[in-house]
Image: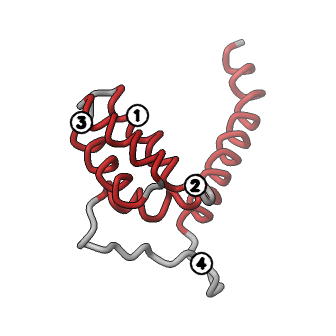
């Protein structure tokens, strides 16, 4: 009886297993396939003169905040103060004092006083 069950389902199990292996191999092929076109992403060049913090401030904040980079820097400094990362907050606030308008500079000085 067991032989009959095994023989009747064996072909089904073999075909399912073969299909799974084929799908796995195709997936691995697509993962490691190199793009043939020249529009592939270029590796990111790192500027070793800037710290990670400064890279975030100089590049990403422009994209996130639009025109109000200094306002976004103030928000970021407030977030750093909340998580008690005082060094990062201080660096950002010092930059706001240099680049911001009068209101932003006053806010930055106030936050620097809290640190």
Q: Is residue 112 positioned above or below 91 on the image?
A: above
Mark in the foreground, 1 or 4? 1
Report the Cα–Cα distance between label 4 and label 2.
32 Å
**Are dots 3 and 2 in contact, CB under 8 Å?**
no
Mark in the foreground, 3 or 4? 3
Q: Is residue 45 positioned above or below 87 on the image?
A: below
Quadrant of residue 48 in the image? Answer: bottom left
Image location of residue 65, percent across then percent down: 59, 53
Residue name at image x 46 percent, y 46 percent: 104
Q: Residues within 10 Å of mark 3 (few under 14, many from 20)?
A: some
Q: Give the residue number, with chain letter if any, for mark 4.
A: 40
The answer to which of 113 and 3 lies nearer the viewer is 113
For label 4, the SS is: loop
Farthest-out residue, top: 1
Q: Residues within 10 Å of mark 4 (few under 14, many from 20)?
A: few
Report the Cα–Cα distance between label 3 and label 2.
23 Å
Mark in the foreground, 3 or 2? 2
Looking at marks 4 and 2 on the same chain, the residue that comes earlier in the sequence is marked by: 4
Looking at marks 3 and 4 on the same chain, the residue that comes earlier in the sequence is marked by: 4
Residue name at image x 26 percent, y 61 percent: 51
Looking at marks 1 and 4 on the same chain, the residue that comes earlier in the sequence is marked by: 4
Report the Cα–Cα distance between label 3 and label 1.
10 Å
Image location of residue 105, percent across then percent down: 40, 48
Q: Residues within 10 Å of mark 2 (few under 14, many from 20)?
A: few
The answer to which of 1 and 36 lies nearer the viewer is 36
Q: Residues within 10 Å of mark 1 (few under 14, many from 20)?
A: some
Image location of residue 62, percent across then percent down: 54, 61
Report the Cα–Cα distance between label 3 and label 4.
40 Å
Q: Which mark is residue 57?
A: none
Q: Give the residue number, with chain letter if any, for mark 1.
A: 78
Picture quarter with the N terminus = top right
């Amino acid at each position: 009886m067991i032989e009959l069950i095994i023989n009747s389902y064996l072909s089904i199990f073999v075909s399912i297993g073969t299909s799974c292996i084929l799908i796995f191999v195709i997936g691995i092929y697509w993962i490691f396939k190199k793009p043939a076109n020249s529009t592939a992403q270029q590796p990111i060049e790192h500027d070793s003169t800037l710290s990670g913090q400064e890279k975030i401030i100089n590049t990403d904040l422009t994209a996130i905040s639009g025109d109000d980079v200094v306002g976004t820097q103030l928000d970021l400094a407030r977030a750093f103060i909340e998580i008690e990362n005082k060094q990062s907050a201080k660096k950002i606030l010092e930059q706001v004092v240099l680049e911001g308008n009068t209101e932003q500079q006053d806010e930055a000085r106030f936050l620097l006083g809290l640190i």
